[in-house]
Image (tube, rainbow, N blue to C red):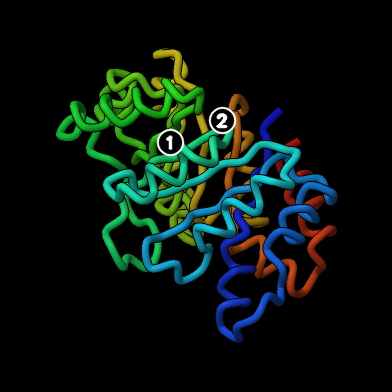
Amino acid sequence: MTKLSVNINKFATLRNARGGNNPNLAQAAIDAQRFGADGVTVHPRPDERHIRYNDVREIKKIITTEFNIEGNCTEQSFVDLVLEVKPEQVTLVPDAIGQLTSNHGWNTIEYKAYLTNMISIFKNAGIRVSIFVDPIIEMIEGAAATGTARIELYTEAYAISQQFTENNKKLEVLNQYVAAANKARELGLGINAGHDLDLHNLKAFKQAIPFLDEVSIGHALICDAIYLGFENTIQMYKRQLQ
């Protein structure tokens, strides 16, 4: 079964736009679980423009499903937070400071020594590590050499390709992801995926890579929830993964 982890960053964006505590982030995490999500994802950034570090601490107190914290491990404050909270999974993303959203994976060859060291720190604390990568065979092979347990395939290119009119171009891009996933599986890595996956493209991706461990979805799911309701939307996404 492919698990659905709901990224609740957008609830924090809405709260921060007005101040106060509405919507309540802890309640959003509780509801995501209650409505059928297999996990909750947060992506705190140093400027705390959406999820705040203290939100992460409060969510940890009430979460009963898998907790996944994404972020840039070059920030010591992020490393300290993860080691303090001890989620089931940390996903390492190579964001620049102030970056609007994640837009590329790690160069696992260039940063092999650095990633190997950081991964060992989290592994020694009992935290499963996943690293964000592009669907490039060499980057998958490099990831396996770092000691990570999983990779997360950065799926923006796939999402964009689904808007192409030419089916051969859609298939060409999808095949890149399938090849990357097959290589990861061959090397013993678990496979997560995320970024711009939605109700229109998720099913085809899951069918092409049926052994996906987990997808992490935030922006599209929360946008759909505005129109369709949070509980209904989570169930709709879950059905795409069957």
Residue on which disc 1 sits: 177
Q: In this view, does 151 lie above or below 24?
A: above
Q: In which quarter of the image is the C terminus?
A: top right
Image side of residue 142 versus residue 6, left or right: left
Name the image quarter holding the N terminus. Answer: top right
Instruction: Kindly indicate whether the residue at mark 2 contacts the one at mark 1 (C-beta within 8 angstroms).
Output: yes
Side (left or right) of 97 relative to 54: left
**How many numbered circles are shown?**
2
Which residue does the numbered mark 2 point to in the structure image? 209
Residue 70: numbered disc? none
Residue 85: image quadrant is top right
- Of residues 105 and 209, which is closer to you in this image? 105
Residue 12 percent across, percent down from the top left: 59, 69
Residue 129 screen position, x and y as percent: 45, 30
Q: Distance between the residues labelled 1 and 2?
A: 8 Å
Residue 224's spot in the image, x, y percent?
70, 67
Give above or below for 94 relative to 53. Answer: above
The percent position of residue 137, horizontal first and vertical second, equals 30, 28
Q: Considering the numbered disc 1 on the image, is that residue within a helix, a strand or a loop?
A: helix
